[in-house]
Image (cartoon, grey):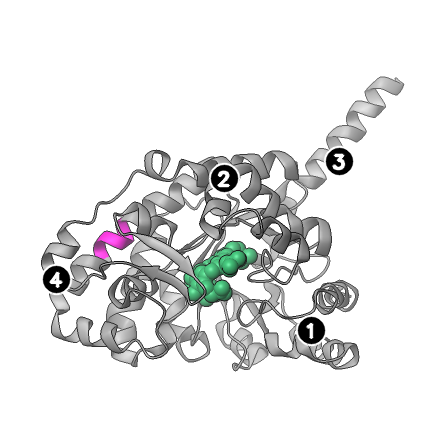
């Protein structure tokens, strides 16, 4: 009898811990959760001294490509912050390298040699098979899943076609996308050909992450907010739609993040994503009220608040959480990623505050 009881208990714990019953997945699908779930963009990174120690031994790209180390970094914020979801440690430019471009990370950020400008540049790019060209990503996912044992869900991710194209055309980050904008207007057909190729690559890449065990997907369209409305529709939204519609998404919530989502959120609903991640200058409760049950929302604390003292952080968290209390389908996050020089203790304090103040009545 005791043995059977133990078995039943054990199973109950297992069922409780299945990620589909997890508050992050529930909120992402617009269902009621016990409290607001919290994770943070760029939660695996330089603000942690444990990460800096690993970076003193490995280059960033080597860390991404060494599954046991990448898995270790993915798990750091689970151990040190106790957030409600893990996000794969990798970079949006990994599949771009696999398409055939040469990638380096320097002091100035990512650099892609021989930027794409002409027909022959686009023609030379391949649509890689993920298990052949980036097996380390799927291996990292499998290792992380084993370690997590269902404690929290694992989010896989990719860059959106437009944001990836902007790096491919500029060859590096750009504050205004000057060359990309010239490219999409002067070489419109070529731009669409490139976006199609990137979208195909991204669909295969994300489906491989899902097959390997990713339980949610976030697509980052970081630079979409720099586009005019017409260009956003043609060059960003259309390809976000294409990617989302190509995913094997049963039971897998899809989150779309775009800087500028505050302006474009109505259109982003057309992607049929489960969650729209909103940046910090938008009025989140108003957006949620307007979109109702069409999608859950994620966001949107200004990450710069985290340079302030605890009282200010707590006040801002409370204000945001109170304004979102009437709604299910809300995931707490920042409007954009954690900056590397934000004090670790402030981030830990933020997460603890959300857990305390985000309980639903
Ligand atoms: O969120 C996470 O913790 C998961 C890991 C992750 C990284 N990059 C690790 C990283 C994710 C999801 C990304 C996405 C990413 N990468 C985006 C989209 C999100 C966003 O921030 O808008 C973009 C645009 C990139 C491209 C990129 N990678 C840039 C521009 C830079 C340099 C700027 C910077 O923050 O250093 C990176 C490097 C990078 N990606 C680091 C990390 C931890 C720092 C690398 C280091 O250790 O030096």
Q: Which residues are magenta?
A: 196-200
| Residue 319 relative to residue 9: left or right | left
Residue on which disc 3 sits: 13
Q: Residues within 10 Å of mark 4 (few under 14, many from 20)?
A: few
> In the picture shown, does residue 36 fall above or below 212?
below
The Cα–Cα distance between marks 3 and 1, rounded to whole angstroms, is 29 Å
Q: CA distance from mark 1 to mark 4?
A: 49 Å
Which of the two discs, 4 and 2, sits closer to the camera? 2
Tell me the mark number nearer the camera, choosing from 2 and 3: 2
- Residue 118 is tagged as 4
* Label 2 residue SS: loop
Q: Mark 4 or mark 3, which has the lower sequence index?
A: 3
Dots 1, 2 in contact, CB < 8 A? no
The local crowd at label 1, few if under 14, some if 14 to 19, many if 20 or more residues have their Cα within 10 Å, is: many
Callout 4 secondary element? loop
Q: Earlier in the sequence, mark 4 or mark 2?
A: 2
Is residue 273 visible to the viewer in this orientation of the structure? Answer: no
Outermost front residue: 56
Location of the N terminus by quadrant is top right
Q: How many marks?
A: 4
The residue at which mark 2 appears reads as 66
């Amino acid at each position: 009898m005791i043995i059977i009881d133990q078995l039943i208990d054990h199973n109950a714990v297992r069922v409780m811990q299945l990620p589909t019953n997890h508050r992050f997945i529930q909120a992402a699908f617009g269902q009621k959760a016990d409290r607001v779930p919290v994770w943070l963009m760029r939660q695996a990174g330089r603000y942690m001294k444990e990460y800096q120690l690993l970076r003193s031994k490995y280059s960033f790209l080597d860390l991404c490509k060494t599954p046991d180390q990448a898995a270790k970094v993915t798990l750091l914020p689970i151990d040190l912050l106790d957030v409600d979801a893990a996000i794969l440690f990798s970079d949006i430019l990994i599949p771009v390298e696999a398409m055939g471009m040469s990638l380096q990370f320097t002091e100035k950020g990512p650099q892609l040699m021989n930027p794409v400008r002409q027909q022959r540049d686009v023609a030379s790019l391949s649509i890689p098979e993920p298990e052949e060209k980036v097996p380390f990503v799927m291996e990292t996912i499998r290792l992380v899943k084993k370690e997590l044992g269902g404690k929290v869900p694992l989010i896989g991710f990719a860059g959106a076609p437009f944001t990836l194209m902007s790096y491919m055309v500029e060859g590096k980050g750009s504050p205004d996308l000057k060359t990309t904008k010239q490219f999409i207007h002067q070489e419109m057909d070529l731009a669409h050909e490139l976006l199609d190729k990137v979208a195909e690559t991204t669909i295969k890449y994300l489906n491989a992450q899902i097959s390997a065990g990713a339980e949610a997907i976030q697509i980052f369209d970081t630079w979409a907010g720099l586009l005019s409305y017409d260009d956003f529709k043609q060059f960003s939204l259309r390809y976000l739609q294409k990617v989302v519609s190509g995913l094997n998404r049963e039971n897998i919530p899809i989150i779309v993040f775009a800087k500028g989502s505050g302006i474009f959120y109505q259109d982003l609903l057309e992607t049929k994503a489960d969650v729209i991640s909103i940046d910090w200058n938008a009025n989140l409760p108003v957006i949620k009220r307007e979109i109702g049950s069409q999608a859950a929302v994620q966001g949107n604390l200004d990450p710069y608040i985290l340079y302030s003292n605890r009282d200010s952080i707590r006040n801002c968290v409370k204000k945001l959480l109170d304004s979102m209390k009437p709604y299910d389908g809300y995931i707490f996050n920042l409007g954009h990623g954690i900056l590397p020089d934000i004090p670790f203790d402030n981030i830990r304090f933020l997460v603890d505050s959300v857990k305390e103040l985000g309980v639903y009545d």
